[in-house]
Amino acid sequence: MNRLTLTIALGFGLMAGPAMAASGWTGGDDLPTSPLACDGTPAAAAAKPYDGGSPTNAPNRAGKKITVVDIPKLIGIGYFNATSKGIADAAKELGNVDAKTDGPTKANIDEQITFIDNYITSGVDGILFAANDPVAIAPVLKKALSKGINVVGYDANSSPDARQWFVNQAQFNGIAKSLIDNMAKEIGEDGSFAIVTSTFTTPNQARWIAEMAAYQAKCHPKMKWLETVEAQEDNTLSFNQATTLINKYGDQLKGIFGMTSVATPASAEAVTQTKKCGSIAVVGLATPNAMKPYVKSGCVKSVVLWNPVDLGYAAAHVLRAVVDGTLKPGATSVKAGKLGDLQVINGSEILLGAPTTFSKDNINNFDF
Amino acid sequence: MSRTFLFRYETVLALLTVLALATLAMLSAKFFTTENLLNQGRLMSEVGLIMLAMTFVIVTGGIDLSVGSILGMTAILLGVFWQKVGMPLPAAIVAAMLCGTLAGLGNGLIITRFKVPPLIATLATLALYRGLAEGISQARSVRGYPEWFFFFGQGEVLGVPVQLWILVICTVIAAVILARTPFGRATYAIGANETAAHFSGIRVDATKLWIYTAAGFLASLAAVIFVSRVTTTRSDMGTGIELDVITGVVLGGTSIFGGKGTIIGTVIGLVLIQALKNGLALSGVKGDGTIVVIGVVLIGAVLAGALLDRDRGGS
């Protein structure tokens, strides 16, 4: 009897593994994944040659005052206000950087491209960006490089050859592991969950979801993914989508992943308002300030994020280092002010560090 | 004659545009350069193309809110036909544009056969076509188009962006049709008084069908140019473009109640908005400030139009 059960379980396990890996979850991208080891053994970093682009005929601006424009996905949300603050802090500290943030009021590829195009015409020295779409933004960034403008990305990448460096806030597989592990801890190894994301084609979220699917299949094979819904980084829409999920799946739904800093608090609010605290877990990426009420009330136990102020700060330092010629293709690390030396990974990316999990114990130490 | 010409809304708007161009040129030395102006021509072509069709739609007293969704759906179909179905790219372009045009025809059929108000009908298809785009694409973007395809969105002919040529040609055709043909007069007649137009022997439904189909066609043409310009296909392409289009058309003097409007006015409206967006950005005004200015200009222009009407004792 026992052997039979075991055989059946094993059979299902063997069938489910490849099936999950093959089907993939909605909202992930098609790129290859590299899930981390279940016990957290760090993966060996493969050496990769520089694959970023380079500006043509850039004037020598080393040590000179430069004008920099920061064009995030959209303006007016807490997350990008924080990166913008980091950039302003670094500019103030460096003294020879004149930085400003401007961008569309909604995460729209076309508007962002137009903004960048206009700043190229107005003649800036450097562009910092967070891409709404990695491929759509590439032609206009290549145009900037061709005009001798230094281009550095942060938060959301473009095709590597369309920019010089990209400041990566956290590796995708690291975030994925952290999210899935936290969820497994809260809802158990056989719980069912759903995802609220921005849009299915947003590069970061798509990458995380793909990595989450791979890591879950590898390390928590019995967890069940129900559905991924889009919420456009819109507060009301995120709340409505989360409420719909709760009503649609009823008791089957044990957990919700919020993939954006907007979706996570909105999902927590939806769970609170439907009085499902304790029976539906919310795990996600969010800024600590937005999550403090839910963490305090005990409705949310773990929030995962890097420090976006540090991200903006690092991006501004990287741009300055590129302009000054201290960060060249082939470098293995770069100095970023108070953050110290940051490591170069994947050829032309700079890693900010490991993600932080905010919980009841430490969330009050952070203010952003 | 000279007095009516002087007080025509389009003349006032043209003067306003010249004034705006001059001011912006003074504010930023980078604004009035050939390179920047041609680049702006490139950026405004997609909206401009749809505005041409929207002028006809609004002149009949209708509205088409689904153009952005048709754009998104055509873009996705283009990618899917090419990559998933395996059609050669030129065939995929034609097939996708055919579907986009049919989507416009669908709007027309709902409006004329079932007498649904255009606002409601196209509000429904706005959701329907966008939903189809998301469903068909499975939310995956299609990338990796061959180099020659980028000609439509990034290429140049005689130093002028390809899509600006397309826009100019379409503008001339639309202007001639609206101002100089029986079809154009039928369009005005429907907008001025649909019942009267019907009893004058004008084929009201057929005219409307053609106009909504043309809106679908131009939206899908814009989609091809858009995909070629940004080198990728996403299901959220063209979201909200209908509002930019309607803003431009209304600023250009087309009455939202129908019966009034010209292509030249629409073109001036397009140029004024694009010039403001670009010129203000170049002179250091941030994005949020620019939207405020455009809102103020729109209100000012509509008020001016209303005052002119009153001075002439209505039209």
Image (spheres, rainbow, N blue to C red):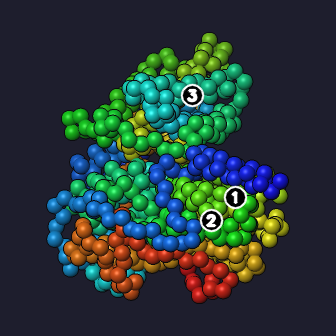
Query: Cα distance, mark 3 to mark 2?
Result: 45 Å
| Mark sitting on residue A223 | 1
Could you tell me residue A162's position as x and y percent?
A: 32, 56
Give the mark toward the camera: 3 or 1.
1
* B127, above or below A146, in the image: above
Q: Which part of the image, by quadrant, shows the N terminus of chain B?
A: top left
Which amino acid lies under the numbered mark 1 shown in the image of this protein?
A: Met
Q: Nearer the viewer, residue A188 or A317?
A: A188
Give the side of residue A128 with respect to residue B105, left or right. left
* A337, above or below A180, in the image: below
* A254, above or below A79, in the image: above
Which amino acid lies under the numbered mark 2 shown in the image of this protein?
A: Ile
User: Is there one chain holding both mark 3 and mark 2?
Assistant: no
Q: Which residue is mark 2?
A: A180
Q: Earlier in the sequence, mark 2 or mark 1?
A: 2
Q: Residue at x 62, y 46 (%)?
A: A19
Query: Cα distance, mark 3 to mark 1?
Result: 45 Å
| Mark sitting on residue A253 | none
Query: Cα distance, mark 2 to mark 1?
Result: 10 Å
CA neighbours of label 2 inside 10 A, class few (<14), some (14 to 19), many (20+) = many
Q: Residue at x 61, y 62 (%)?
A: A219
SS of the residue at dot 2? Answer: helix
Image quarter of residue B269: top left
Give the mark toward the camera: 3 or 2.
2
Any part of residue A328 in sight: yes
Q: Which residue is mark 3?
A: B104
Are the two marked residues, 2 and 1, in contact with CB atoms closer than 8 angstroms?
yes
Image quarter of residue B174: top left
Could you tell me residue A356's position as x and y percent?
A: 55, 77
